[in-house]
C-alpha cells in the first residue's frame, strides 16, 4: 500500500497531471514534463547518501519520511502561483522519491532479511505492479470533480496519513548491529576484489541501459505504434497489455525464481525485452506479441533490480551498492525523455525504436558477460550460480 501511494504521488503522477496543468495555466508543456525529469535527477543525486544512511541507521525512519516529503511537495504543487514554484515543488518530490521508491525499500529489506529478502522483494513488486491500474483512474476522477490543485491536496493528505504509520508499524525500531556495519563512502572500500568491481560495473551498465529503454518506451510507445500505421484506439489497447504482462511475469518469477540464481532472471529479462522490441520494429502485426514479451521482461527487471545485487554482493554492503547503482541509473533515466524526444523529432519514431532495440541487444551482451563473471567467481568460491 505504501509503495502504491508513493509511486502514484510521484513518478506516475505527471501522466495524469500534465495535461490539466498546461490547460489550466498555459505554462510550457516542455517545462511541466521536464519538472518530473528534474525530480528523478534529484533522487539519483541523493541515492548514494540514502543508501549509506540505511546501511548505518536502518530504513524505518527514512522510508517513513517519504510520505511526508512527497505530501509537502504536492501541497507546494497545489499552491504554485507560477512555473518556477511548480518546478521547485518537484525538487521536493524528488527528495521524497530518493527516500521512498524501490531502491531504499530494497536496501531496507535486504538489511532486515539478509539473503532471504528475495521473496519479500518479489511479492512487493508483484503487488505494486497494479499501481497505475489503481492510481491513474483515482487521480482522473479526482481531477474531473475537484481540479488538479485540489487533487494534489487530497492525495497529499492520503500520503501523510497512510505511509508514515505503515512503515513505522512494519519495520522494527532497531536493526541487528551485525547488519549495520560502518561503511565507507567510496565504492572501492565496499568491493573486496577485482572480480566484484568488474561485476559492479557490468551490473551498473546493464541497469542503466534497461532503465533508459523502460523510460523511453513509457514516454513514446503510443507515438511509435501510431507511426507504424496503428490507430490510436488500437495503440492504446496494445499498450494496455504492458501491465498484465509485467504482473504475470512477476507471478511466475515468484513461483519458480527462488530455485535459481537471479542472474538467470536478469538474462531472461534482457532477452525478452530485446525480443519484444524487435517484434515491434519488424511489423505492426507483431506489435501486440512484442509488447507482451517486452512487458514480461520489464516486469522481471523490477525484481532483478533488487535481488541480483543482493545475491552478488551480500546483505552487508547491499544498501551501499544499491545507492551507488541508483545514481547513474536515475540520472540516465532523467535525461532519457530529452534524448528520446530529440531522436523522435529529428529522425522519426522508427529510428528511435531501432536505437532502443540496439541498446536492448547490447544489454543482452552485458548480462552474458556478467553471467560469465558470476560463474567464474562462483567456481573460485566453491559455489554454483544456479
Image (cartoon, rainbow, N blue to C red):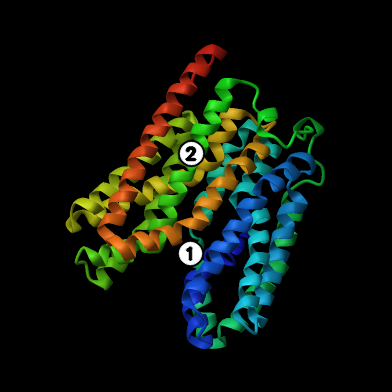
Residue 43 image position (x, y, % from top left)? 63, 55
Q: Residues within 10 Å of mark 1 (few under 14, many from 20)?
A: some
Residue at the spot of label 1: 132
Mark 2 vs mark 1, foreground winner is 2
Image: 252 above or below 87: above
Left of 319 or right of it: where is 15?
left
Image: 383 above or below 172: above
Image: 146 above or below 304: below
Q: Residue at x 74, y 39 (%)?
A: 55
Residue at the spot of label 2: 205
Residue 297 image position (x, y, % from top left)? 38, 45
Badge 2 or badge 1: first in the primary sequence: 1
Q: Give the CA distance from mark 2 to mark 1.
A: 28 Å
Image: 176 above or below 152: above
Q: Residue at x 52, y 87 (%)?
A: 24
Residue 52 image position (x, y, % from top left)? 73, 42
> Pointer 2 and pointer 1: residues touching (CB < 8 Å)?
no
Amino acid at each position: 500500500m505504501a509503495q502504491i501511494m508513493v509511486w502514484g504521488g510521484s513518478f506516475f503522477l505527471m501522466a495524469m497531471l500534465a495535461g490539466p496543468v498546461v490547460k489550466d495555466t498555459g505554462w510550457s508543456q516542455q517545462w511541466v514534463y521536464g519538472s518530473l525529469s528534474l525530480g528523478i535527477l534529484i533522487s539519483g543525486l541523493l541515492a548514494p547518501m540514502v543508501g549509506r544512511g540505511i546501511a548505518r541507521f536502518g530504513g524505518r525512519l527514512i522510508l517513513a519520511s517519504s510520505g511526508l516529503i512527497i505530501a509537502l511537495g504536492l501541497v507546494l504543487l497545489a499552491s504554485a502561483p507560477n512555473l518556477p514554484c511548480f518546478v521547485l515543488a518537484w525538487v521536493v518530490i524528488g527528495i521524497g522519491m530518493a527516500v521512498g521508491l524501490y531502491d531504499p525499500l530494497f536496501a531496507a529489506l535486504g538489511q532486515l532479511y539478509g539473503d532471504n529478502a528475495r521473496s519479500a522483494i518479489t511479492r512487493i513488486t508483484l503487488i505494486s505492479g497494479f499501481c497505475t491500474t489503481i492510481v491513474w483512474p483515482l487521480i482522473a476522477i479526482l481531477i474531473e470533480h475537484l481540479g488538479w490543485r485540489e487533487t494534489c491536496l487530497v492525495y497529499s493528505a492520503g500520503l501523510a496519513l497512510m505511509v508514515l504509520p505503515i512503515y513505522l508499524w512494519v519495520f522494527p525500531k532497531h536493526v541487528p548491529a551485525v547488519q549495520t556495519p560502518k561503511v565507507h563512502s567510496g565504492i572501492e572500500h565496499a568491493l573486496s576484489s577485482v572480480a566484484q568491481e568488474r561485476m559492479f560495473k557490468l551490473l551498473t551498465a546493464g541497469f542503466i541501459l534497461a532503465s533508459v529503454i523502460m523510460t523511453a518506451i513509457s514516454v513514446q510507445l503510443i507515438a511509435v505504434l501510431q507511426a507504424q500505421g496503428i490507430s490510436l484506439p488500437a495503440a492504446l489497447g496494445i499498450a494496455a497489455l504492458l501491465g498484465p504482462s509485467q504482473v504475470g511475469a512477476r507471478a511466475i518469477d515468484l513461483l519458480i525464481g527462488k530455485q535459481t540464481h537471479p542472474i538467470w532472471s536478469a538474462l531472461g529479462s534482457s532477452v525478452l525485452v530485446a525480443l519484444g522490441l524487435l517484434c515491434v520494429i519488424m511489423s505492426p502485426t507483431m506489435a501486440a506479441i512484442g509488447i507482451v514479451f517486452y512487458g514480461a521482461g520489464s516486469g522481471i527487471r523490477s525484481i532483478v533490480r533488487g535481488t541480483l545485487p543482493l545475491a552478488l554482493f551480500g546483505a552487508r554492503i547491499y544498501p551501499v551498492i544499491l545507492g551507488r547503482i541508483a545514481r547513474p541509473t536515475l540520472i540516465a533515466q532523467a535525461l532519457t525523455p530529452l534524448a528520446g524526444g530529440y531522436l523522435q523529432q529529428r529522425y522519426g519514431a522508427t529510428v528511435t525504436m531501432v536505437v532502443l532495440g540496439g541498446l536492448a541487444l547490447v544489454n543482452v551482451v552485458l548480462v552474458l558477460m556478467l553471467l560469465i563473471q558470476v560463474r567464474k567467481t562462483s567456481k573460485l568460491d566453491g559455489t554454483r550460480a544456479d
